[in-house]
Image (tube, grey):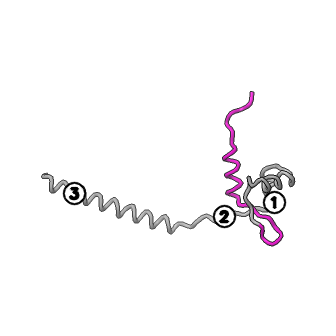
């Protein structure tokens, strides 16, 4: 196989790979998106085993994002999980 034939073969392979990637991207975009789960204060307090005052302190210190809808304060479950993950400590105190 000469160089020209090799280049043609490589270009075909690259084109095939690009088309495959584009098809995968389209398929991923068609997957159902996970809907955000919203938790109320009681749910968060139960989940984190914290008091109402501690929850208020987390909000006041801007460590826990929230939204107010009407008179109710709601929290994204993903924000709660992120805080837990960010503060996860694998080192134990001896």
Tags 2 and 3 touching, CB below 8 Å: no
Residue 71 painted magenta: yes
Answer with the quarter of the image where residue 20 lies: bottom left
Percent x, y of residue 43: 79, 58
- The C terminus lies in which quarter of the figure? top right
Provide the residue designation for mark 3. Answer: 9
User: What residue is shown with label 2?
Assistant: 36
Q: Residue placed at 67% from the left, 57% from the top?
A: 78
Q: Find the residue positioned furthest to the front.
A: 61
Q: Residue furthest bottom?
A: 70
**Residue 33 x/y as whole percent:** 58, 66
Task: Between label 1 and label 3, give the one nearer the viewer.
Answer: 1
In the foreground, 88 or 46 = 88
Identify the residue at horizontal 86%, vertical 51% (top origin).
Answer: 51
Residue in front for this viewpoint, 30 or 84: 84
Residue topped by disc 1:
41
Outermost residue toward the left? Answer: 2
Q: 10 Å neighbourhood of mark 3: few (<14), some, or many (≥20)? A: few
Q: Who's the residue at 78% across and 67% down the image? A: 68
Q: Could you say whether the residue bearing mark 2 is in a helix, strand or loop?
A: loop
Q: Which residues are magenta?
A: 68-94
């Amino acid at each position: 196989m000469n160089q020209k034939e090799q280049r043609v073969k490589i270009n075909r392979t690259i084109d095939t790979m690009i088309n495959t990637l584009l098809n995968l991207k389209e398929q991923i975009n068609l997957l159902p998106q996970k809907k955000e789960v919203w938790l109320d204060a009681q749910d968060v307090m139960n989940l984190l085993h914290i008091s109402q005052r501690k929850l208020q302190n987390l909000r006041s210190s801007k460590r826990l994002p929230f939204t107010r809808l009407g008179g109710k304060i709601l929290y994204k479950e993903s924000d709660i999980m992120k805080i837990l993950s960010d503060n996860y400590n694998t080192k134990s105190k001896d």
